Image (cartoon, rainbow, N blue to C red):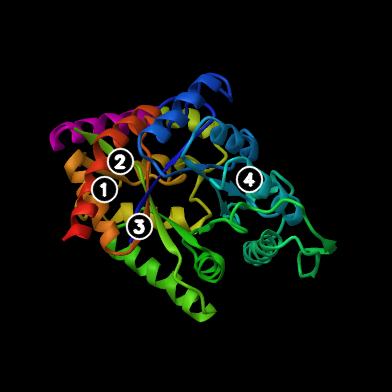
Amino acid sequence: MTVEFVGMIGASYYSESATPTGPAIDQAYLRRFARAYDEGGFDWTLVPYGSAAPESNQLAAAVLGRTERLKVMLAHRPGVLFPTNAARAFATLDQLSDGRLGIHFLAGGNDTEQRREGDYLGKDQRYQRAAEYIQILRRAWSSAEPFSHHGEHYRFENYSSQVLPTNRGMTVSVGGSSDAAYRLGGAEGDVFGLWGEPLAETAEQIASVNRYADAAGRPHPRIWVSFRPIIAATDELAWEKAHRTLDRVRAARPVRAATSHYPTAEQGRPANVGSQRLLEVAARGELHDRALWTPLVTATNAAGSSTALVGSYETVAAALLDYVDIGCELLSVRGYDPLNDAVDLGRYVLPLVRHELAHRTAA
């Protein structure tokens, strides 16, 4: 098993533990952040998508232009670009970066957020559209031969492109926690992304994705699981840091309520299944398995990946290996102090995980 590490990058400083300040794009910060991932041994960084955020395709190009080995997993919503245009745009960026691009497809779990950009399809239709979209892109990436398509959501004739991805294809990632997401990921994904839940629940989700892959006659997707580690030299120091972080997140909540595109606890229960699942895990207890800590889920109303792994460098490395043992091959780790935590994770945690994996291989 090849295990890879994934971060997440923003165009300027943002954390749930602080009130937003500064410009939407801070080029000096972006440069330092990208270099921290590149030099810290991360394999990928996610470039996220948001209707009010800096445009993700251009942000991905900036990250790739500022790094040498780091790969970018570009979040993309089908429906924003016509698939033939997207196929060409992604192939161009993949060529310019020597094959360092993957695409993370977001069918969309929040009707309000989708409608901000004119997408009024229901959830089931969005997942059907995403499947058709991915199929078109794979066809467009594989050959320069012209082809036509007449589908439920897209129609075009005699499309061809002079630019193809470096390897006549690129990594296709799908994420989510609903049955529709499992179905799409099993049928179309090379990678399937999950937010960090306890080990038993994560194993159940992996099994659900794999059943759909089996039904489609496809290889099982590689599993990508996401956490927000809070680390320090000792467990005691890490727990002190965790509680300070929780206090800051709670203090910043009123500002997030006024500025966030996702509902805070005061605004109601989130619509997407992934957030609902995290809130249910948090309701069952604060600490799960070796180090999975959930109060930050409640404090953020599960607005994205929010479960923390808390402990010393050794404790968190061991907790990550627990997920490797149940089949997770991509480990997403980003802290609540994004840039400084990226440096510390690359310096202290990633080497421990890789050393243990190398030892297992040698043994």
Residue 308 left/right relative to 92: left
Which residue position holds label 4?
95
Name which of mark 4 and mark 1 comes first in the sequence: 4
The CA span between labels 3 and 2 is: 21 Å
Q: Nearer the viewer, mark 1 or mark 2?
A: 1
Which residue position holds label 1?
354
Q: Which of marks 4 and 1 is in front?
A: 4
| Image position, residue 358 (x, y; %) | 23, 53
Give the position of the C terminus as an image quadrant. Answer: bottom left
Residue 230 left/right relative to 44: left
Which residue position holds label 3?
2
The CA span between labels 1 and 2 is: 17 Å
Extent of the magenta region: 233-251
Q: Which amino acid does label 4 sit on?
A: Gln
| Contact (Cβ within 8 Å) of mark 1 with mark 2 | no
Give SS at disc 2: loop
**Label 2, residues with CA under 10 Å away: few <14, some 14-19, many ≥20:** many
* Image quarter of residue 205: bottom left
